[in-house]
Amino acid sequence: MSGVIFLIQGEKLIEMKEEKYDSEDLLQKLLENYPKILAGDQINSENPRKWLLISREMGVPDDENASDRWSVDHLFIDQEAIPTFVEVKRSTDTRIRREVVAQMLDYAANGVEYWKIPEIKVQFEQRCSENGTNPSDVVQQALGLEVEYEKIWTLVESNLKNRKLRLLFVSDEIPKELKRIVEFLNEQMKDVEVLAVEVKQFNGENLKTLVPRVIGQTSQAEQIKNPGQKRQWDEQSFMDDLPKKVSPEDVSVVKKLLTWTHKNKFRIWWGQGSQNGSCYPIIDLPNSSHQFFSLWTNGKIEIEFQWMRRYPQFADPEKLLTCLRMLNAIPGVRIAEEAVKGRPSFSVSVLRDEKNYSRFIDAVEWLLQEIRAN
């Protein structure tokens, strides 16, 4: 049933009636021009979400080197560089009830697997070029961040790698079938926030009012997604926590690895885990950034194969298998070949032995040579 709201303008009462959108494209265009419609204050009242549109109709492939099979209506990021997929449907479109969910899950599952950050960055910069704007200025103005432009893309990359996403279904009216599915998914998915945003339109006397409402936030979802307070780790907190979880010998190995990364001009990105600290040594080249492994305060070394395989230098899977075999030559490391698609790990204690440590460094240096040679 259509609703009515009243606007007082001076001494005049204006009756504004709810109306359907003439087209899906109209609602999409409104989101492009006015991202605040996505109600970032309702999504997070303590730290309202700010939005930066990366691209409309962002292509999504379904294989490593395939062309785009689908396109998500909008790809945004927020001030934490969390990729936010937005799919828009009018309530008159029957796909808004259930089919849109399958579409969105296709986009998310394949986007995190096959998107390459340089390509996403190019899409954003092309949009800025068309608008005559500076990409760095657009990021700062939209998100209110005083950070290096390139670091934003490193954060986007990290969030994609860790499957930290947000999926938003947007319509003028969210049907009960979709509402139930959204609430269910949001309660079941720890790192992926699944919500619907209902954006009703009211018109009257050449005035338009948009009223957004976020759907899908339940107390159960909140408990699942925030079981403990997340923290931003840094070198001091990482090194303070490490001795509580590993032996003094393993602490020495981690210190040795960090010293090696500093000597070789790696930049360290510190994680945000609620229980275990993490750090990601990143090598910055003129037009790209790369990470090969990460260190954790629970004593694990994680090999970032899943991320490396997106780099053009490792498009040939045999190259990563070469690295895997170099690592498997270290006594105590056993990584199955199929793990080259994931993020396998092993205990840092394996590297207490000087020969094992040298073999690990040889593998990382080989990766560095491959990156720099291409």
Image (cartoon, rainbow, N blue to C red):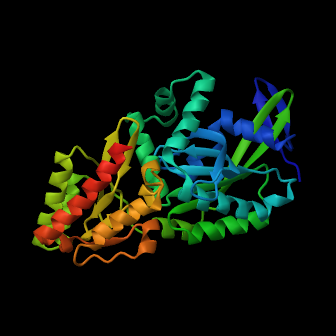
Q: Residue at x 20, y 74 (%)?
A: 350
Specify the quadrant of the image occupied by residue 351. Answer: bottom left
Q: In this rendering, would 193 be left or right of 201?
A: left
Q: Position of residue 136 (x, y in %)?
A: 46, 29
| Quarter that holds the N terminus | bottom right
Picture residue at 82% right of the left edge, 26% below the top: 12
Q: Residue at x 84, y 35 (%)?
A: 203
Residue 205 picture location, percent across and down: 87, 27
Residue 179, horizontal then vertical, whole percent = 72, 64
Whether residue 264 is situated above or below residue 175 in the rendered picture? above
Residue 123 appears in the figure: yes
Q: Residue 244's image quarter?
A: bottom left
Q: Does residue 46 appear left or right of residue 2 in this picture? A: left
Task: Identify whether 205 is placed above or below 187.
Answer: above
Q: Position of residue 268 (x, y in %)?
A: 27, 49
Residue 96, located in which quarter of the rendered image? bottom right
Left or right: 358, with 291 as reference point: left
